[in-house]
Amino acid sequence: MSLKSALKKLKGFVRSRSIHITVVNTGGCNGCDIEILACYTYRYDLEQYGIYYHNNPRKSDVLIVTGPVTYQWRDKLVKLYHKVPEPKAVVAVGTCACSGGIFNQRGGRVCGPVREVIPVDAEVPGCPPRPEEIVSAVVDVLPALFRSWELRRGGAREAQEA
């Protein structure tokens, strides 16, 4: 077995047992970002589910987007989305990410909510949303993510039965 295939197998093993998220703010007020950070405190402890924060989109599974998508961020967000390997999930957190919020006005520099730029798997409305709602949304997208992961690994029969 070559080193490259051994590392690929190890990466698949580790990745199948933990999830990495990347958080991107596309032009909001940072209120949702504070609530996402609260998800990692001892009270909510997102890591108890095997979900870890990661800055590199190439090594993450879930992309969490906060804030309305500004024109400056539109192309960058699409590029970032394509850097996240399959299977992936996108969670839009906050009213701004879900609808554009107060920034989505005529003459504004906002091109709209996240779902108009990239596909979104879950939305968490609120200004800002509560940490337990964010945790719930992230945990809710995991079964679909794991199902897709099993299908890509060749376990199509087991994944379809679930």
Image: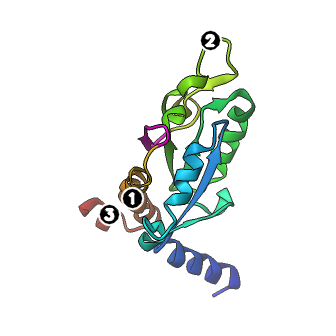
- Which stretch is magenta? 120-128
Locate residue 97: give its quadrant: top right
Residue 27 in magenta stretch: no
- How crowded is the residue under tag 1: few (<14 C-alpha within 10 Å), some, or many (20+)? few
Residue 18 shows in the view: yes
Residue topped by disc 1: 139
Which of discs 1 and 3 lies nearer the camera? The answer is 1
**10 Å crowding of disc 3: few (<14), some (14-19), many (20+):** some
The amino acid pointed to by label 3 is Ala
Residue shown at the point (30%, 67%) measured from the top left:
158
123 relative position to 61: left or right: left
Q: How is the image coloured?
A: rainbow
Camera-side residue of 95 and 144: 95
Q: Earlier in the sequence, mark 2 or mark 3?
A: 2
Residue 117, given in percent of the width and then of the height, sits at 59, 32
**Secondary structure beneath label 1:** helix
| C-beta proximity under 8 Å, tags 2 and 1 | no
Q: CA distance from mark 2 to mark 1?
A: 36 Å
For marks 2 and 1 on the same chain, the one whose residue lies earlier in the sequence: 2
Question: Which residue was labeled with disc 2?
Answer: 106
Q: Quadrant of the C terminus?
A: bottom left
Above or below — where is 105 with respect to 143?
above
Relative to the observer, which residue lies in front, 86 or 25?
A: 25
Q: In the image, residue 94 lies at what x, y percent? A: 50, 39
Q: How many marks?
A: 3
Amino acid type for the residue under numbered disc 1: Val
Which residue in the protein does label 3 denote?
159
